[in-house]
Image: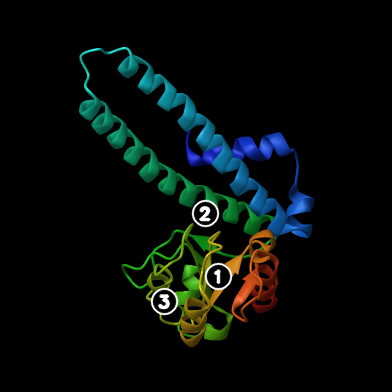
């Protein structure tokens, strides 16, 4: 049994030992390592479950190729949907632990404006809903394993936040998309090892450490 996404991250942290100081010093490296280990653990679990699923089908002489393909296809689609969901949840949990280690003030997964539910609000939902709290000190961060056009969803969250942020592991974002993000005051956040995959770093692409420093400046 693989367990919940929280179980996966906690197991990874236990295996890596006490990394609180390392998180504060190199949050990008730790965050990226946690996501990679989370993905490896899930793929190992998938391989075992798929093997157990396929074994009896291979021995079933009454099962024709079409029925076999149908059953395998359904199982594979289930894996893909579960993988995306789990990867997104693992990313949020990992970010939560990184932000806690950095001593940031934030709310995770709380509702604002009645029906909006951004992943992270800095410093808090109460401050966001306090009309006297300076808008320049508010930040919203959305977490997406793959951005594509999903970054526009984050734009609709938190009208008081001038510059929205989104974190992802997506290393295939085009220059045109970065330009569209920049025009919409949207800044992308990635772990440095992922940013290093880009030959030219766009102006609106920052590291986890950069984002933490920016938020800290607003909270000091």
Instruction: Give how far across and how far down residue 13 sits, in percent.
Output: 67, 40
Q: Residues within 10 Å of mark 1 (few under 14, many from 20)?
A: many
Residue named by callout 1:
122
Q: Earlier in the sequence, mark 3 or mark 2?
A: 2
The quarter of the image holding the C terminus is: bottom right
Residue named by callout 3:
155
Does dot 3 land on a helix, a strand or a loop? helix
- At 40% across and 67% down in the image, what residue appears? 150
Residue 17 sits above or below residue 153 on the image: above
Does dot 1 land on a helix, a strand or a loop? strand
- At 34% across and 17% down in the image, what residue appears? 58
* Mark in front: 3 vs 1: 3
* Mark in front: 1 vs 2: 2
Q: Earlier in the sequence, mark 1 or mark 2?
A: 2
Residue 105 sits above or below residue 81 on the image: below
- At 61% across and 46% down in the image, what residue appears? 36
- Residue 92 is marked as 2
Q: Earlier in the sequence, mark 3 or mark 1?
A: 1
């Amino acid at each position: 049994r693989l367990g919940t996404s929280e179980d996966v991250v906690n197991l990874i942290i236990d295996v890596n030992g006490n990394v609180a100081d390392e998180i504060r010093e190199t949050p990008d490296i730790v965050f990226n390592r946690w996501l990679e280990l989370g993905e490896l653990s899930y793929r190992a679990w998938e391989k075992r479950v798929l093997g157990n699923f396929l074994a009896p089908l291979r021995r079933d002489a009454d099962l024709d190729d079409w029925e076999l393909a149908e059953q395998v296809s359904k199982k594979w689609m289930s894996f893909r949907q579960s993988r995306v969901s789990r990867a997104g949840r693992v990313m949020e949990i990992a970010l939560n632990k990184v932000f806690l280690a950095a001593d940031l003030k934030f709310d995770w997964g709380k509702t604002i404006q009645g029906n909006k539910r951004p992943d992270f609000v800095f410093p808090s939902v109460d401050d966001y809903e306090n009309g006297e709290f300076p808008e320049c000190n508010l930040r919203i961060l959305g977490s997406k394993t793959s951005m594509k056009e999903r970054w526009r969803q984050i734009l609709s969250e938190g009208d008081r936040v001038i510059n929205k942020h989104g974190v992802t592991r997506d290393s295939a974002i085009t220059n045109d998309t970065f330009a569209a993000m920049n025009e919409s005051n949207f800044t992308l956040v990635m772990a440095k090892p992922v940013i290093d995959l880009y030959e030219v770093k766009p102006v609106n692409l920052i590291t986890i450490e950069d984002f933490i420093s920016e938020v800290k400046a607003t909270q000091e």
